[in-house]
Image (cartoon, grey):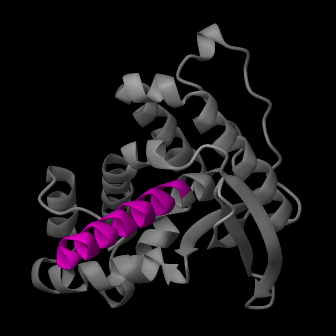
């Protein structure tokens, strides 16, 4: 009986981490959002475009609060209409995440000497796999989730910024979620998220190191597209 109870607790902890991982990714993608496109834009007033220039910590706070609020308001709609949820998540990924830079980091040594086309092929397949795998997990985070920004730390002489925050659940439990951002042009973009100190980029790099060594970039990208392999942001 004790073993079963322990297994249940481990399973619940895993589900919570998955929900937090999905929520963190979605919020991170909104951190540099130039706009947000609702699935029912024709029936609703257009959302005000959030700022993309200024202090990264303020961008995280403002836009993270916006996206969490949107998910809460449209939870019932998204639960009934997975297509609307997929469109919402895809919009966030496609507009706000520095997927090619993140993809190159995930490739690591396997990306050295790779063509830009191959890096893009892998990066797009990885991002789409994440959207497919974790989109529905967004619906499982607690109502009343709040974002609390704690600090902003410049790295590499200011080329990169680490924004430290907490995801605070309705019961007051806080989970540390950090964002690594870099400036592209006049805007800040997110390229990595750390939940409880665990980097998604490093997790993916470890996960795909073996397959990339054995199969190469193009085949791993094809396997991701075909669903033969999935990106697992939480263990």
Please name the predominant secondary structure of the magenta segment in the image: helix
Q: Position of residue 175 (x, y in %)?
A: 61, 71
Query: How many numbered marks have been drawn onto this rendered protein structure?
Result: 0
- Picture residue at 18% right of the left edge, 68% below the top: 220
Q: Position of residue 227 (x, y in %)?
A: 16, 53
In-image side of 152 versus 28 (left or right) = right
Residue 217, quarter of the rendered image: bottom left
Q: Is residue 207 visible?
A: yes
- Picture residue at 69% right of the left edge, 72% below the top: 182
Q: Nearer the viewer, residue 159 or 3?
A: 3
Image quarter hosting the N terminus = bottom left
Residue 103 lies, with reference to residue 85, above or below; the image says below
Image quarter hosting the C terminus = bottom left
Magenta stretch: give its range. 1-23
Residue 153, quarter of the rendered image: bottom right
- Picture residue at 36% right of the left edge, 87% below the top: 112
């Amino acid at each position: 009986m004790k073993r079963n109870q322990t297994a249940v607790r481990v399973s619940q902890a895993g589900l919570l981490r998955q929900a937090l991982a999905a929520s963190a990714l979605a919020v991170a993608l909104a951190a540099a959002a130039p706009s947000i496109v609702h699935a029912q834009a024709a029936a609703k007033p257009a959302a005000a475009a959030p700022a993309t220039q200024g202090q990264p910590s303020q961008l995280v706070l403002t836009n993270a609060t916006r996206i969490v609020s949107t998910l809460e308001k449209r939870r019932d709609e998204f639960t009934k209409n997975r297509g609307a949820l997929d469109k919402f998540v895809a919009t966030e990924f496609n507009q706000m995440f520095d997927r090619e830079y993140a993809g190159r980091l995930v490739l690591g040594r396997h990306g050295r000497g790779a063509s830009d086309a191959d890096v893009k092929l892998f990066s797009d397949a990885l991002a789409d796999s994440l959207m497919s795998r974790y989109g529905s997990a967004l619906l499982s985070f607690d109502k009343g989730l709040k974002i609390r920004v704690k600090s902003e730390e410049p790295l590499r002489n200011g080329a990169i910024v680490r924004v430290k925050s907490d995801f605070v659940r309705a019961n007051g439990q806080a989970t540390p979620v950090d964002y690594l951002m870099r400036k592209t042009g006049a805007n800040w973009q997110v390229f990595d998220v750390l939940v409880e100190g665990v980097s998604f980029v490093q997790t993916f790099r470890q996960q795909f190191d073996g397959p990339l060594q054995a199969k190469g970039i193009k085949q791993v990208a094809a396997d991701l597209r075909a669903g033969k392999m999935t990106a697992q942001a939480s263990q």
